[in-house]
Image (tube, helix red, strand yellow):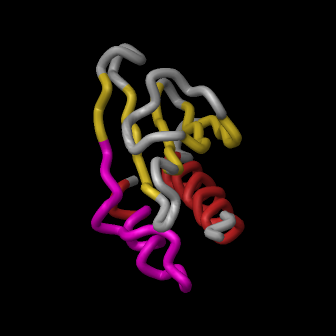
């Protein structure tokens, strides 16, 4: 998911995030296998970040008021279930949402 997200970030113009500043973290406390969090800090917005989390067959997304992984998925604005054999489609849908949010963010 991080590699695919960075490829999308590099294609945005004007850039709202820098691909090299995005990061991912595995948080073991969320689910049996852990939760993978992707954090995308927004350029020009101090302490604003878009985040995606994936765990237990679900991807969630939302805005966070810090550049750290969610302590809890507050502010959730996107959710997609990962059905068998649909991981790539679910990741694509999550990245579509992420890109649309970055295109609509007010940077003034």
Q: Quadrant of residue 80?
A: top right
Q: Is residue 17 magenta?
A: yes
Task: Tell me what residue is drawn at x 31 percent, y 26 percent.
Answer: 27
Q: Quadrant of the C terminus?
A: bottom right
Residue 4 higher or lower than 49, as above or below: below
In this orientation, which residue lies closer to the viewer: 21 or 98?
A: 21
Task: Tell me what residue is drawn at x 35 percent, y 68 percent.
Answer: 19
Task: Tell me what residue is drawn at x 45 percent, y 71 percent.
Answer: 9
Residue 108 higher or lower than 42, as above or below: below
- Find the magenta span and give its range: 5-24
Residue 15 coordinates in the image, percent (x, y): 50, 78
Q: In the image, 60: left or right of 36? A: right
Residue 2 coordinates in the image, percent (x, y): 35, 56
The residue most toward the bottom is: 13
Residue 3 higher or lower than 23, as above or below: below
Q: Is residue 97 magenta?
A: no
Residue 60 coordinates in the image, percent (x, y): 58, 37
Residue 73 coordinates in the image, percent (x, y): 56, 27
Task: Tell me what residue is drawn at x 40 percent, y 46 percent.
Answer: 38
Q: In the image, 45: left or right of 2? A: right
Q: In the image, 73: left or right of 70? A: right
In this orientation, which residue lies closer to the viewer: 81 or 8?
A: 8
Numbered disc total: 0
């Amino acid at each position: 998911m991080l590699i695919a997200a960075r490829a999308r970030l590099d294609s945005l113009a004007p850039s709202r995030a820098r691909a090299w500043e995005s990061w991912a973290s595995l948080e073991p406390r969320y689910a049996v296998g852990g939760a993978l969090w992707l954090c995308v800090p927004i350029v020009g917005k101090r302490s604003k970040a878009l985040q995606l989390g994936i765990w237990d067959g679900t991807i969630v997304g939302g805005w966070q008021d810090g550049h750290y992984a969610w302590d809890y998925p507050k502010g959730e604005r996107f959710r997609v279930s990962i059905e068998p054999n649909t991981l790539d489609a679910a990741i694509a849908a999550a990245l579509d949402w992420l890109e649309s949010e970055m295109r609509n963010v007010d940077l003034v």
